[in-house]
Image: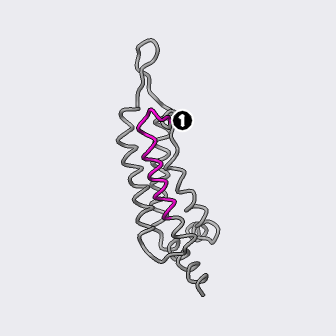
Amino acid sequence: MLRKAMSGPIAVPVVLILQLVPLVIFPLESYNLGSQEWWLPVLLSVFALVAIFKLLVRRSHAQWPWYLLSFSQGFNIISRLMMAMPHATSTAQGGGIVINSKYLVITFVAMALSAFMIWYCELPEVRKRVSASAAARRA
């Protein structure tokens, strides 16, 4: 029942567009130009936008947009795991070490959302829904 609702004609395009959310949620400090963290979320978002455009607008039957979405989300998980340790703590004004809970929470939420997106895009019902809408549009 849940899978049927998740692969509905409205749910699939909405969730595919929401692919961008786990790729770009970072603390605002990560997006300053002095940081080197901002370019990877932007690049992964461009990859996801190309794949979403190919699937939803161009109605492609090709497999590479699905692979590109999975690559973007998977690389998001890997990059966040690599960045979690350097950002896990910060130095307070008094010289003590403080846990950067905001960054860690955002990181784990984004990784969970990326894992969900990978799982969702691999559902046969979702791929059939996109393929069926492409076939209906061509007919």
Rendered image quadrant of residue 81: top left
Q: Residue furthest bottom?
A: 139
**Residue density around tag 1, few if under 14, some if 14–19, many if 20 or more, within 10 Å:** few
Image vertical order of residue 116 relative to residue 56, above or below:
above
Camera-side residue: 19 or 139?
A: 139
Rendered residue at 41%/69% (across/down): 64
Q: Position of residue 87 (x, y in %)?
A: 40, 32
Residue at disc 1, secondary structure: helix
Q: How is the image coloured?
A: one colour
Rendered residue at 60%/88% (across/down): 139
How many numbered markers are drawn? Answer: 1
Q: Position of residue 82 (x, y in %)?
A: 35, 41
Camera-side residue: 103 or 67?
A: 67
Image vertical order of residue 95 relative to residue 12, above or below:
above
Image vertical order of residue 13 relative to residue 83, above or below:
below
Q: Residue furthest top?
A: 94
Range covered by the magenta-colored residues: 32-51
Camera-side residue: 133 or 47?
A: 47
Residue 20 magenta-drawn? no
Q: Position of residue 35 (x, y in %)?
A: 43, 34
Please name the predominant secondary structure of the magenta segment in the image.
Answer: helix
Rendered residue at 61%/81% (across/down): 137
Rendered image quadrant of residue 83: top left
Give the amino acid type for the residue marked by disc 1 in the picture.
Answer: Leu
Q: Is residue 130 left or right of residue 95?
A: right
Q: Residue furthest right?
A: 10
Which image quarter holds the N terminus? Answer: bottom right
Rendered residue at 53%/64% (across/down): 52
Q: Which residue is labeled 1 in the image?
A: 28
Residue 46 magenta-drawn? yes
Q: Position of residue 85 (x, y in %)?
A: 36, 34
